[in-house]
Amino acid sequence: MSRAGMWLKMTAAFAVFSIGGPALIYYVQPTDEELFKRYNPELQKRSLESRNERQQDLDKFVTKLKEYSRSDKPIWEVAAEDEARTKASAAEEQQRLAAELQKRRDEIRKLSISGK
């Protein structure tokens, strides 16, 4: 076989694999609607009910990513700082609630002791 024939054969093989492969995947892979239709009715109902919640979660996630990207630092560092800040505020809130609960208990004890 000549060199031109070999190049022609390799070009044809490249075309078949580079065009035919993705075309086959596109043809074989089902669309989202087809997958949804294959769900049983209970799963379809749950999926429709939770769709808004999932969309809101995604919107919050994208909003946070945009907020993080405004910083000069890498996103993962800003996210870690924000997570630490959130944990600290949650711990402070927990301590505040525990102190408030203890204060209520002390008041109830005082009232019960003085009421005897």
Image (cartoon, rainbow, N blue to C red):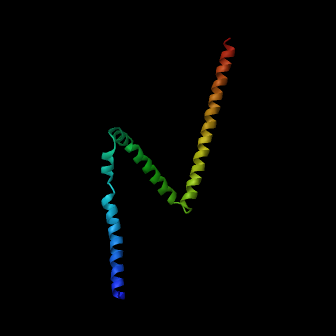
**Residue drawn at 33 percent across, 41 percent down:** 40
Question: Dividing the picture into quarters, in which one does residue 98 lie?
Answer: top right
| Place of residue 12 in the rendered image (x, y in percent of width and height, measured from the top left) | 32, 77
29 and 100: which is toward the camera: 29
| Place of residue 70 in the rendered image (x, y in percent of width and height, measured from the top left) | 50, 60
17 and 57: which is toward the camera: 17
42 and 78: which is toward the camera: 42
81 and 8: which is toward the camera: 8
Q: Quadrant of the N terminus?
A: bottom left
| Place of residue 86 in the rendered image (x, y in percent of width and height, measured from the top left) | 57, 46
Question: Dividing the picture into quarters, in which one does residue 89 lie?
Answer: top right
Single out the residue that lies furthest toward the front: 1
Side (left or right) of 15 relative to 94:
left
Above or below: residue 105 compared with residue 84: above
Above or below: residue 97 compared with residue 89: above
**Residue drawn at 67 percent across, 20 percent down:** 109
**Residue drawn at 37 percent across, 39 percent down:** 46
Q: In which quarter of the image is the C terminus?
A: top right
Side (left or right) of 99 relative to 29:
right
Question: Dividing the picture into quarters, in which one does residue 28 lie?
Answer: bottom left
Above or below: residue 13 compared with residue 59: below
**Residue drawn at 33 percent across, 85 percent down:** 5
Single out the residue that lies furthest toward the top: 116
